[in-house]
Image (cartoon, rainbow, N blue to C red):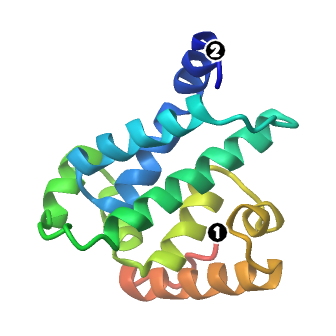
Amino acid sequence: MRSEEEVNRAVDRYAPMVRRLCMVHLKNRADTEDIFQTVFLKYALSSVLFQSDEHEKAWLIRVTLNACRDLLGSFFRSRTVPLDQVLESAAPAGSENREVLEAVLSLPPKYREVVYLHYYEDYTAPQISRILHKNVNTVYTLLTRSRRMLREQLGGDDCEG
């Protein structure tokens, strides 16, 4: 079990990342807050000794993704929220990034995860492969396919970046 200081430091440091990950997966503010609490409760009760800040961050990402998947796969999850409601909270109306965010949110989860980790959290493909427990070549393939899907959705010719 971690001290209150450790938990508060982790919440201060990683709260935005955990919330964004949850919103990308759950598309629902209430479920995001539930998972947020679950993730940091698991952190507080965990006895894992982290080797570095990156190890701690990767652990929180893994726990967050697993908690989101558990919730999405649960039998009791019966309500959905329109994508417009998510977009209003994630990107202000008229924002240039709204169209891109819409396109990213419409990707299948396995593509959405790698795009989020690569472009929003600045992880490299080898780092993503360790976090998601996937082969690094699989991550490169997922990134390539997701870029192609985004290019088709957004109608651009040079969206490689």
- In the rendered image, residue 115, in percent from the top left (x then y), is placed at 56, 67
- Spatial CA span between label 1 and label 2: 42 Å
**Residue, x 53% and y 78% (percent of image)?**
110
- In the rendered image, residue 4, in percent from the top left (x then y), is placed at 57, 12
Q: Quadrant of residue 108?
A: bottom left
Residue type, mark 1 in image: Gly
User: What crowding class fits label 2: few (fewer than 14 Cα within 10 Å), some (14-19), or many (20 or more)?
Assistant: few
- In the rendered image, residue 131, in percent from the top left (x then y), is placed at 72, 61
**Outermost residue toward the right in this view:** 51
Q: Please identify the quadrant where the N terminus is shown.
A: top right
Residue type, mark 2 in image: Ser
Which residue is disc 1 drawn over?
161
Q: Is residue 91 visible?
A: no
Residue 102 falls left or right of residue 22: left
Determine contact: label 1, label 2, CB under 8 Å.
no
Residue 118 falls left or right of residue 147: right
Q: Please identify the quadrant where the C terminus is shown.
A: bottom right
Which SS class for mark 1? Answer: loop
- In the rendered image, residue 54, in percent from the top left (x then y), is placed at 78, 41
Q: Nearer the viewer, mark 1 or mark 2?
A: 2
Which residue is disc 2 drawn over?
3
